[in-house]
Image (tube, rainbow, N blue to C red):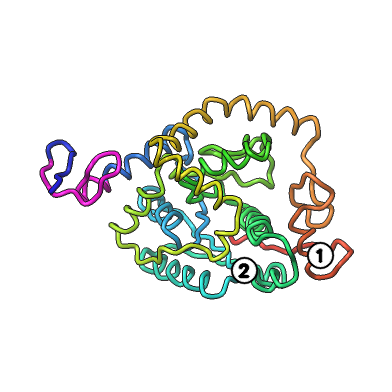
């Protein structure tokens, strides 16, 4: 039997992450880690009105719980892509959690915003599910959250290490520059800044915290996830982590060292080109039409530029 390592606690350990901990001291360790990230990077100011991007999974539910516990004045925002047998289950978990904790929940669906669900869209296109879903999901998060000071997401250390390597593998320095605990490069009234309170928390730590807190959620993965480039990079990094423990943390630490230069590079490029807006919906875009409008018009069989109508949730 292994005992908790915290200050000669002596209680039986229930988890071994950096060290063996009993339940109470693991929760204390985890929460102090998240709070330290928020404080160090000034992710939330005193009067910030924060919306949490929620899926009903372990990561976003953990963020929602902690921000509500420490700051209050949070709203949960869920995007219903329309994935039968998956999203309906996680959204029900989220509704129950928000009801128990008296947290306002707003849900925006692909069907009401775009006129089709992801399930329906995938019958008409040949692109990978995560490509179209990621584009439409990010579009709805940003446009629906306008008016809030920040969007908090559940990205953990594993997620961020994957994103860093994905962008390096693809040579996307501009996209890499947008990563970090506080995302973004340039400021614009139509961009809602995104924060990642779980930035330095391993996925296994988040899973343990959610389990020990008994959030009442399903620990399941989107059925389309295994088809993605991210899944391949995730498996690659997990193998490396087994062979060379600390690999993911080293990726994060070294990335943060070069992030200021990446942001400087990306900011200079953005200033030269100027911030552009989609000619259809008016959202920020690097092209004449944003990717969301291109997908939507293509799926609806339109050659015109009918705008997407999304109403902010507040």
Out of 137 and 35, give the one closest to the viewer: 137
List the residue tagged with mark 2: 109
**Is the residue 147 above or below the residue 43 in the image?**
below
Residue 65 rendering spot, x and y as whole percentages: 38, 55
Q: Which residues are magenta?
A: 9-27
Label 2 crowding class (10 Å Cα cut-off): few <14, some 14-19, many 20+? some
Q: Do tag 1 and tag 2 residues touch (Cβ < 8 Å)?
A: no
Q: Residue at x 37, y 63 (%)?
A: 101
- Element under label 1? helix
**In the image, what residue occupies the spot 30% across and 43% down?**
17
Q: Quadrant of residue 214?
A: bottom left
Q: Nearer the viewer, residue 242 or 63?
A: 242
Is 71 on the left or on the right of 27, as rendered?
A: right
Quarter of the image with the C terminus is bottom right
- Tell me what residue is drawn at x 56 percent, y 45 percent: 194
Residue at 32% x, 53% y is 208
Q: Quadrant of residue 116?
A: bottom right
What percent of the width, then of the height, locates residue 236?
51, 45
- Is residue 55 shown to the viewer in this render? yes
Residue 153 within the segment the image draws in magenta: no
38, 249: nearer the viewer: 249
Per the rendering, the mark at residue 190 is none
Q: Residue 24 magenta-drawn? A: yes
| Rendered location of residue 266, percent (x, y) | 69, 31
Q: Nearer the viewer, mark 1 or mark 2?
A: 1
Q: Where is residue 190 drawn, in percent x and y? A: 69, 47
Q: Residues within 10 Å of mark 1 (few under 14, many from 20)?
A: some
Q: Is residue 49 visible?
A: no
Which label is found at residue 298?
Answer: 1
- Find numbered disc 2 in the image and state the secondary structure of the residue it sits on: strand
Alpha-carbon span between mark 1 and mark 2:
19 Å
């Amino acid at each position: 039997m292994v005992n908790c390592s915290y200050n000669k606690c002596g209680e039986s350990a229930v988890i071994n992450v950096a060290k063996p901990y009993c339940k109470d001291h693991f929760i204390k360790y985890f929460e102090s880690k998240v709070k330290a990230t928020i404080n160090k990077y000034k992710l939330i100011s005193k009067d910030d009105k924060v919306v949490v991007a929620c899926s009903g999974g372990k990561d976003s539910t953990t963020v929602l719980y902690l921000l509500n516990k420490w700051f209050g004045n949070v709203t949960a925002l869920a995007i219903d892509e329309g994935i039968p047998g998956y999203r309906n289950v996680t959204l029900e978990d989220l509704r129950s959690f928000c009801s128990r904790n008296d947290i306002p929940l707003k849900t925006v669906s692909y069907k009401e915003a775009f006129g089709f669900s992801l399930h329906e869209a995938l019958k008409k296109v040949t692109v990978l599910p995560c490509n179209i879903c990621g584009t439409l999901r990010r579009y709805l998060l940003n446009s629906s959250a306008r008016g809030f000071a920040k969007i908090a997401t559940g990205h953990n250390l594993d997620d961020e290490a994957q994103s860093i390597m994905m962008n390096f593998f693809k040579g996307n320095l501009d996209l890499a520059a947008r990563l970090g605990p506080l995302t973004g490069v340039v400021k614009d009234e139509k961009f809602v800044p995104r924060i990642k309170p779980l930035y330095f928390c391993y996925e296994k730590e988040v899973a343990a915290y959610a389990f020990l807190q008994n959030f009442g959620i399903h620990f399941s993965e989107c059925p389309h996830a295994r088809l993605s480039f991210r899944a391949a990079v995730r498996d690659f990094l997990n193998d490396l982590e087994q062979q060379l423990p600390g690999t993911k943390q080293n990726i994060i630490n070294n990335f943060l060292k070069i992030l200021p230069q990446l942001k400087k590079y990306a900011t200079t490029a953005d200033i030269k080109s100027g911030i552009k807006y989609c000619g259809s919906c008016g959202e920020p875009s690097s092209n004449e039409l944003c990717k969301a409008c291109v997908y939507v018009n293509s799926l609806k069989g339109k050659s015109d530029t009918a705008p997407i109508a999304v109403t902010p949730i507040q």
